[in-house]
Amino acid sequence: MNFLHKSLLLFLLSLFAFQANGQVCTNYHIDNCRWADNSFFYSRQSRSALFSNGITSKFKIIVYSNEEYYISIAGHKKLGNINITVYEDNDKKTELYDNSNFKYEESFYFENKKTRQLIIEVTSEKDENAKNTNKKYCLGVLIEFRKMQNAKRKSKSNNIGF
Amino acid sequence: MSLKRIMFVLVIAFSIVIVNSCKSDNSQEKHKNNLVGFQTTENLNDIDIRDEQEIYYRFPSAREMFLYINDEDFTYRTDLVNLPNNVDNYLDSKSKTLNLGVYLADLSYMTLFGKTGNLKKYMNAIAVLSEDLRLEIPYERNIFIRINKNINNNDSIINIADEYYSKVIDYLMKNNKEKTLAVISIGGYIEGLYIAINLTDEFSENSPVIQRIAEQKLSFENLKMFTYKFRNDKNASQSIIYLNKIMSVFNEFKIEKQATKIKQYKTNSFVIEGGNSIIVTKEQYMKLKNVVTEIRMQIIENY
């Protein structure tokens, strides 16, 4: 390998290092979360982010009345069990769901009767043995929704007679 | 020194500059590198680091907002959308960005009602504004080629228009243009609310559509909080003024408090019942209608 080739190789390696340093997770939930069936629509309230072990992060979403929601979570395996807790954003911060009560299930579904603000709180598992706790990995939360099936059926069954 | 050595030294120097710029380019980045979680953005230049919020705010897209309007319950009105010819009147970046949101909401409204006659004109208006704002929507050219090929197939045109809408919003999110997304969303939300309010003929306390319009208070709150972190940006701060005017009317709506109940069905399936209700009177609703109509006129007429 001559000088020129060596130089070029070094240059490409430095570019690769630059790329690897700037980890981007924007689409992680789209590529890694388990999707519901086709009757659900993708919500742009879905979100991915960088996480390290043992951190908690929250985001606030809106869920509309008479809609069904499917929420699915996925993270890099080094983040361990991912705990997702859902609170209503009211005075009491009512806890609605906590997947640690259900063996850290990675997806759940709910029917929502009234429009409300929810707080989605996500916590990655602590890694006591990790040498470098600053290592970051991607984690994503996928949110899908559809009009409530029962509501649809009810309104249709009411539309009878004159 | 031989040419090879000069080349070698130059490449080494260039590589060092690149690797270092990766660090020093981000003097703020040092702080950010310690940040993880949903509230962090990869485009740090957009926000003041001191404003980093504990909670990250998400809000439904204007199209998600529209889904409650059932085309079976309403008659499509052509006079509610912004004319595509107005695109030439938008010369500054604020009006271009806000009206990009307006046209995207109009596009959603038309596709929801299956109205294909003017879709291409609206997609053209969106393409013009996004190009002016230097947004590079992927495969945009292919989308227009497909529109031309399917000009007589309504279903295909609706699907392509829907796909185009998604591509614009996805582009903004994937490329961390959240500041632009915030202003576009403000335009889209105001247009969506304007259309919804004007589609409903009369006020009725029990109308589910009027109830849903009142509930948009919560979506507007999240959008405002999301935009607030970009308030140092001129376009965002001016757009927040519009939001504040609408929020001041929403804040007059009464909140009826009720406990929330959970019915657990299976391990990962439940129903959320009860919770607070937003109560709107006829006077408040009319006030909201007037304020939204006035602001929407300011946006589309650019004054």
Image: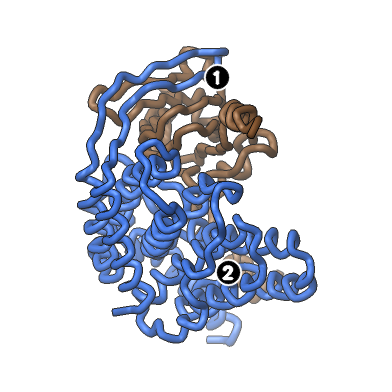
Q: Is residue A128 left or right of residue B3?
A: left
Q: Which chain has been coloured blue in this picture?
A: B
Kind of residue at badge 1:
Ser
Residue B112 lies in quadrant: bottom right
Name the foreground residue: B167 vs B148: B148
- Give the residue pinned by disc 2: B137
Q: Secondary structure at mark 2?
A: loop
**Colour basis:** by chain
Chain label for disc 1 = B
* Disc ID at residue B245: none
Of badges 2 and 1, nearer the viewer stands: 1
Q: Residue at x 45, y 47 (%)?
A: B60
Decide which of tag 2 and tag 1 comes sooner along the chain.
2
The residue under the point 62% across, 70% down is B119
Q: Position of residue B177 (x, y in %)?
A: 43, 62
- Mark 1 lies on a secondary structure that is strand
Q: Residue at x 53, y 44 (%)?
A: A43
Q: Position of residue A75 (x, y in %)?
A: 54, 34
Q: How many marks?
A: 2
In the depicted structure, whether residue B273 falls above or below residue A30: above
Chain coloured brown: A
Query: In this orientation, does residue B41 appear?
Result: yes
Instruction: Name the foreground residue: B293 vs A81.
Output: B293
What residue would you read off at disc 1?
B269
At x 57% / y 13%, what residue is drawn?
B266
Q: Quadrant of the C terminus of chain B?
A: bottom left
Label 2 neighbourhood size at 10 Å, few (<14), some (14-19), many (20+)?
some
Is A75 placed above or below B288 here?
above
Residue A3 in view (yes/no): no
Chain holding disc 2: B
Q: What amino acid is found at the position of numbered circle 2 in the picture? A: Ile
